[in-house]
Image: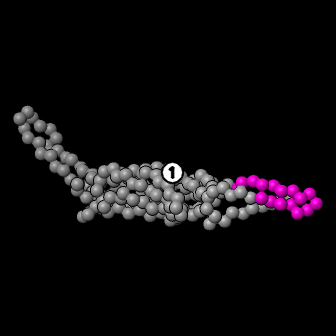
Amino acid sequence: VTLTLTVEESVPAGVYPLTVTDNGPGNQIVAFNLTVSAFGFSLSKNTDISVTQGATTNNTSIITVTRTGGTSQPVTLSASGLPPGAFASFNPASCNPGTTSCTSTMTVTTTSGIGATPTGLHTLMVTGTAGASTATVSLGLTVSSSLNVLLTASPTNIIQGGQVILSANITSYTGSPQ
C-alpha cells in the first residue's frame, strides 16, 4: 500500500506531525513529521550590459531564476536603479522555475539626444518576487556615446617655423554631449 500526500501551495512552511492508522488486521500505527519548506529561489545574470546611448543592440542580459527549496511558484521580475532616460523590460515578465530553473531576457533601452541617458557606469538591482519571497542580483549598466572624428592637416609638408591647419570633421555621432 502506498500513501501519497500532496501539499497545496497555500500550506504555510513548518513541521506537521502526522499519524497514519491501519484499520486492517494488523492495526499498525505510524507517526512521523511532515516538513513543508517555504519556496526559495536565487537570481543570477549571464552578463552586465554595455550599450551606446539610444542603441537597440547589445542591450540584453539573461536572468536565471533557480529554485532552492519548497514548492515552485511564479517569480515576477523588476529592475531598480535605472538612470534617467533608461527603461527595463523582461520577457517573460515572470517565470516559474519548476523543479530547477527558468530564464527571462532583460532588455534595457536608453535614450540619446536632449535628455539622453547619462553616460557612465550605473548599478541596477534586479528583484524577483514570489509571494513573500524575494531575491536580488546586481547588474552593471555601462552607457557610452559614440563620436567619430576625421582629423586632417594642411599642408602635409611644413618647414620649420611654418604653420599647419588642422581640421576636424565629425563623421558620425550617437548620443549627446556630456
Q: Nearer the viewer, residue 125 or 116?
A: 125
| Residue 42 sits above or below residue 75 on the image | above
Give x and y (percent) for residue 38. 60, 57
Question: Residue 58 lies in what quarter of the image?
Answer: bottom left
Q: Is residue 89 left or right of residue 25?
A: left
Give x and y (percent) for residue 79. 42, 60
Q: Nearer the viewer, residue 73 or 91?
A: 73
Who's the residue at 53% across and 52% down the image?
42
Give x and y (percent) for residue 43. 51, 53
Who's the residue at 24% across and 50% down the image?
149
Q: Is residue 1 left or right of residue 170?
A: right
Who's the residue at 57% across and 64% down the image?
74
- The C terminus: image quadrant: bottom left
Q: Is residue 158 left or right of residue 68?
A: left
| Residue 46 sits above or below residue 74 on the image | above
- The N terminus: image quadrant: bottom right
**Label 1 belongs to which residue?**
44
Residue 55 visible to the viewer: no
Q: Magenta stretch? A: 19-34
Who's the residue at 69% across and 63% down the image?
7
